[in-house]
Image (cartoon, grey):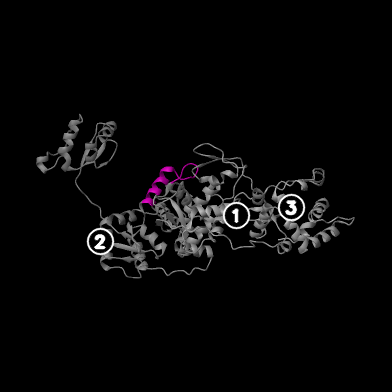
Amino acid sequence: MKELRESLLEHETVMLEVIAQQWGLSPGPEGKQELVKRLETLMKDQKALGDVLGRLSLEEREALESLIHWGGKVSSSFFTRRYGPIRPFGPAKLLRERLWENPAGPAEKLWFLGLIFKTFELTDAGLTEVVYIPQDLKDLIPSSQGEQSPRTPEILHPSRELPAAHHLAEALFLFLVYLQKEPAKAAPDGSMPAEVTEAIAKFIKERGAWPPLWGELFFPLVQHIAMALGLITLEAGKIKPFPEKLRPWLKSPAHERLTGLWQAWLESISWNELRLLPHLVWEDTGRRNDPRLARRRVISFLGRCPAREWVSLESFVSLIKEEEPDFQRPDGNYSSWYIRDRATGEYLMGFEHWDKVEGALIRFIVTGPLHWLGVLELGVDESGNVISFRLSSWGEKILSQAPIRARPEEPIVVKPDFTILVPHDASLYNRFQVERFASWTGSTAEAHLYLVTRSSLQEAFLRGITLDMILRFLKRATGGRLPTAVIQSFKRWDKLQKTFTLRNVLVLEAPGPLAMEKIQEEPELKELIKGLLSPTLAIVEEKDVPQLEEALRRAGYFLRKVGKAPEERGQTT
């Protein structure tokens, strides 16, 4: 923070003369440098300073005390919104209108007394104007408050808890699993079609990785993070995992993956929470907000929260509004963004709508992304409304930036009944491989459960995965503890799936393609047709001939039999 002499020198001579007059100093014919020197000496005199402070009104003293409490500086927009404007003026206007005799409010009174100054500082939001008290002057001002410890939000215990879970990490893994098995055909613009996103979302929900809140905004963030980390690619019109990125990501230690997700969200510019809030409608005027500013300020205030205590969500929002309301609008301008309330159509312009815009954004960041990333546990009341939160053990680690020791990876376990147990601390790469040839059956507190069946193996074989590849993987991933009976069963199933089968079937010939299409619209007939050989030829089973003949008769068709009579060989042709 600047000292008093440097601050005074930045004023024009006319302004210095006004300040001197307020302090009872009569300027002489000396130059600016000499006037600043005399003024600085007077302002640092305890008696003179005490006299000036004693003449302050209660509001002016409160403004000065608040500035000291905030560490001696605060954003100009925040300070003047509370304590009145400091009007822009030049020397001519200052003298002509004698503005110091009728200040616009407490802030301007302190300005004309030379007790506060303005400057620009480089912050996360860019170049920001701040109001400050020169450091050497601030040290001389007695304060009833002084620089107190930062305020903390209130404690509020919930009726029920929503434990912190790594929803985003798990959903991202399942997203990649799905695309590995079924690459998605991209829309003409390269995006993922709605029907595909719905299918993947359903897959994630079935696996229990869907969060309890803000579900409509959850999957878009999963997709965004996948793209931000380069884990998916568009190849030959299909969206699928990018092998060069996928393998090292899966093989990396769990804490590195989780930290990577945290950083990808924290530093993303294209993922813009404010523009996604469902109750707001943005009118694009070309002005942009930087979504990183809101995240950083929310995280900064999380540092104020007592460790392992349930913090009131509304108290947390109020604390930010009280101390740093302009966290995403450094210029303090609440009229430049054209945002409407979706329900009423009302424009939410002006600081009076702070709770519907900034307040809603804070609530979403806390109950959405910070919960999805496993940083916060949520507390709800009896009606299911989120009323409080607290840092999880992972949240404490990520916010403190303390070194995190990698946990040893556990081997997977294959049981004689073809069940595979993948511990939560197992390699994610190993779990990804299991997903390729086994069916997920559920999860416990200790492990994810899978079952290998002939059907799941056959699907793997159709995707080009061989039995040798599966057995080599299982021997490695289990540490060599693979039951002999399982190996033998796998080999027997592999042999069966390589064996051709020849069986007697009958061919039903339709008089034309339209007739074949029409009978397939009849539920009873559709069930009897086991496959199509051509638009007019279908496969049926011998045992179904009597039922087929009757069903065709009811539909208005006749069945002509060609070949040996059924009684000659026990079947109908």
Q: Nearer the viewer, mark 2 or mark 3?
A: 3
Q: Does the magenta stretch include residue 200?
A: yes
The residue depicted at 9 percent of the width and 41 percent of the height is: 568
Density class for disc 1 (Cα within 10 Å; few <14, some 14-19, many ≥20) is some
Query: Is residue 267 visible to us here?
Result: no
Residues rendered magenta in the picture? 185-205
Quadrant occupied by the C terminus: top left
User: Helix, strand, or loop for circle 2?
Assistant: helix
Residue 426, placed above or below residue 210: below
Q: Nearer the viewer, mark 1 or mark 2?
A: 1
Residue that label 1 marks: 323
Where on the picture, by quarter, is residue 32? bottom right
Q: Which of 522 and 560 is in front in this view?
A: 522
Q: Does residue 60 appear to the left or right of 413 in the view shown? A: right
Looking at marks 2 and 3 on the same chain, the residue that comes earlier in the sequence is marked by 3
Residue 509 location (% of width, % of height): 23, 35
Which of the labelled discs sits on residue 492, or is there none? 2
Amino acid type at mark 3? Trp
Amino acid type at mark 2? Arg
The furthest residue to the top? 556
- Mark 1 vs mark 2, CA separation in Å: 71 Å
Amino acid type at mark 1? Glu
User: Helix, strand, or loop for circle 1?
Assistant: helix
- Mark 1 vs mark 3, CA separation in Å: 21 Å
Q: Which of marks 1 and 3 is in front?
A: 3
Which of the labelled discs sits on residue 111, or is there none? 3
Q: Nearer the viewer, residue 174 or 481?
A: 174
Residue 437 location (% of width, % of height): 34, 58
Looking at marks 1 and 3 on the same chain, the residue that comes earlier in the sequence is marked by 3
